[in-house]
Image (tube, rainbow, N blue to C red):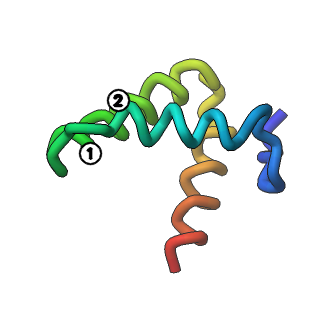
Amino acid sequence: MTDLILTPNLENADGFYADLTAAHDGLNKAESDALNARLVLVLANHIGAAKVLSNALKAAKLQDT
Protein backbone atom coordinates (compact mmCIF):
# COMPACT_ATOMS: atom_id res chain seq x y z
CA MET A 1 0.00 0.00 0.00
CA THR A 2 1.51 3.33 -1.05
CA ASP A 3 -1.45 5.66 -0.57
CA LEU A 4 -1.03 8.14 2.23
CA ILE A 5 -3.75 9.06 4.69
CA LEU A 6 -3.72 12.87 4.55
CA THR A 7 -6.93 13.45 6.48
CA PRO A 8 -6.95 13.56 10.29
CA ASN A 9 -6.17 10.05 11.52
CA LEU A 10 -4.36 10.43 14.84
CA GLU A 11 -5.67 8.55 17.80
CA ASN A 12 -5.74 11.11 20.63
CA ALA A 13 -4.25 13.91 18.52
CA ASP A 14 -4.33 16.40 21.40
CA GLY A 15 -2.45 13.98 23.63
CA PHE A 16 0.18 13.35 20.97
CA TYR A 17 0.61 17.09 20.42
CA ALA A 18 1.04 17.60 24.17
CA ASP A 19 3.64 14.81 24.31
CA LEU A 20 5.46 16.21 21.28
CA THR A 21 5.64 19.73 22.67
CA ALA A 22 6.66 18.40 26.10
CA ALA A 23 9.52 16.47 24.47
CA HIS A 24 10.85 19.82 23.19
CA ASP A 25 10.61 21.60 26.57
CA GLY A 26 13.97 23.03 27.61
CA LEU A 27 15.66 22.33 24.28
CA ASN A 28 17.40 24.99 22.25
CA LYS A 29 16.77 25.31 18.50
CA ALA A 30 19.55 22.90 17.50
CA GLU A 31 18.45 20.29 20.05
CA SER A 32 14.83 20.66 18.98
CA ASP A 33 15.76 20.25 15.32
CA ALA A 34 17.82 17.15 16.19
CA LEU A 35 14.88 15.67 18.11
CA ASN A 36 12.61 16.25 15.11
CA ALA A 37 15.15 14.63 12.78
CA ARG A 38 15.46 11.57 15.04
CA LEU A 39 11.67 11.29 15.27
CA VAL A 40 11.36 11.40 11.47
CA LEU A 41 13.97 8.65 11.14
CA VAL A 42 12.31 6.47 13.80
CA LEU A 43 8.93 6.81 12.08
CA ALA A 44 10.46 6.26 8.62
CA ASN A 45 12.06 3.07 9.90
CA HIS A 46 8.72 1.97 11.31
CA ILE A 47 7.01 2.57 7.95
CA GLY A 48 9.83 0.97 6.02
CA ALA A 49 8.27 1.09 2.54
CA ALA A 50 10.36 3.29 0.24
CA LYS A 51 7.41 4.25 -1.98
CA VAL A 52 5.31 5.34 1.01
CA LEU A 53 8.19 7.41 2.34
CA SER A 54 8.74 8.97 -1.09
CA ASN A 55 5.06 9.89 -1.28
CA ALA A 56 5.20 11.34 2.23
CA LEU A 57 8.18 13.52 1.32
CA LYS A 58 6.37 14.81 -1.75
CA ALA A 59 3.19 15.52 0.25
CA ALA A 60 5.13 17.32 2.97
CA LYS A 61 6.97 19.44 0.43
CA LEU A 62 3.69 20.44 -1.22
CA GLN A 63 2.34 21.55 2.16
CA ASP A 64 5.30 23.91 2.53
CA THR A 65 4.59 25.93 -0.61
Tag on residue 33? 1
| Callouts 2 and 1 close, C-beta under 8 Å | no
Q: Residue at x 20, y 39 (%)?
A: 27
Instruction: Report helix, strand or loop for mark 2.
Output: helix
Circle 2 crowding by C-alpha within 10 Å: few under 14, some 14–19, many from 20: few
Image coordinates for residue 1, horizontal then vertical, percent: 84, 33
Q: Name the residue carrying label 2.
A: 38
- Identify which residue, 42 or 25, lies in the foreground: 25
Query: 4 left or right of 65?
Result: right
Instruction: Report helix, strand or loop for mark 1.
Output: helix
Picture quadrant where residue 25 is located: top left
Picture quadrant where residue 49 is located: top right
Image coordinates for residue 2, horizontal then vertical, percent: 78, 39
| Separation of marks 2 and 1 at Cα, in angstroms | 9 Å
Q: Residue at x 57, y 42 (%)?
A: 17
Circle 1 crowding by C-alpha within 10 Å: few under 14, some 14–19, many from 20: few
> Considering only order in the chain, which callout, 1 or 2, is on the residue closer to the N terminus?
1
